[in-house]
Image (cartoon, rainbow, N blue to C red):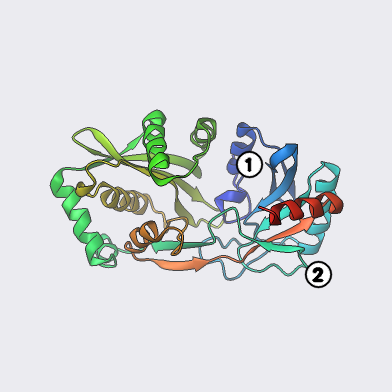
Amino acid sequence: MSNGVNGSFLQSKEWEEIQRVYGRRTWRIQDILLVEQDLPFGFHYLYAPRPDFGDKNNVVADVSRAISPDPDQFLKEAIYLGKKEGNIFLKIDQVSDISFSQKPYAYTAPLQPAKTVIVDLSRSKENLLSSLHPKTRYNIRLAERHGVVVEESSNLSEFLALLKATSVRDHFLPHSDRYYEALASVRSPKFFNAIFLARFEKTPLAGAMVNFFEDMRGVRTATYLHGASASTMRNVMAPHLLHWKIMRYAQEKGYQWYDFWGIDEKRRPGITRFKKGFGGFEKEFAPSVEFPCRKGVYSLYNFMRTMR
């Protein structure tokens, strides 16, 4: 299976297959992936996740093209498709600001993280370790002294049990089991989602689902998609060793980047501090843009959205 021309795994053929396995309809315009997303009351919208229009500032997801997609032609065809298929609007999660001739109706929060931390893995193990915050290095060694063991696992149910416990503690709603099953089911030589578990005395204390993707330019990125941790035995610092071992795993397999996939100083200060402890640079994405496909229904939807 070939990968999409876009540098983000979100535009790959494998990600498109995951969406279809999960039951979502997909299309491509100028090879840019569009996914139909559900809204309340049986409505839907078209979603383009991080499309590449020849962005020169995308450090990780930069792909050479013979011909870059034309933003205005893409927009025209996508709005027409949305209207034909009954979608209310088109939402585009931008990497950086796309130059559309038509002004977006709205700038909104993206579905994907607006800001992230990315670690450069193309260094020696010693250089990588020295770039970590001293407290992070200390916690990694503490976990090792406690005997925490990190392993790649095929036990999805064990990871999901840990994830559900985390969601109750941290008050968030996880995806359905079927969604994680879809993530685990699709793989190719250049795309797969792996589960890693950190155990203490055989008990799983922390887990992560990580995407491994190589784009058409050969840039290889590991992305931390979903994580979980137990509420017990937190003093053994299992999550710190978990991510260090994942970074080393990726590094040994020739991946250049480890993307922590989202930080938010205001909403998630603790998690943000944890991720920034592993060094790396911060990357902020442009706002998401929306264009109506069915103007009357979209106006009603926007009115209801402001009334929340």
Question: Helix, strand or loop at disc 1?
Answer: helix
* Nearest the eye: 305 or 68: 305
Q: Is residue 172 visible?
A: yes
Q: Find residue 255 and report its horizontal and vertical position in percent.
A: 41, 54
Q: Position of residue 144 (x, y in %)?
A: 17, 48
Q: Secondary structure at mark 2?
A: loop
Where 205 falls versus 262 (above or below)? above
Identify which residue, 117 or 300, lies in the foreground: 300
Question: In this view of the protein, which residue sits in the foreground, 276 or 186?
Answer: 276
Front position in the image: 64 or 50: 50
Q: How far is mark 2 from mark 1, CA to CA?
A: 28 Å
Image point 73% across, 51% down: which residue?
304
Q: Which label is found at residue 101?
A: 2
Residue for badge 1 = 16
- First in residue order: circle 2 vs circle 1: 1
Residue lying farthest to the front in this orientation: 307
- Amino acid type of the residue that numbered disc 1 sits on in the rendered structure: Glu
Figure quadrant of residue 227: top left
Residue 279 position within the rendered picture, expressed as x and y whole percent measured from the top left = 34, 65
Q: Amino acid at mark 2?
A: Ser
- Which disc is residue 165 wearing? none
Image quadrant of residue 231? top left
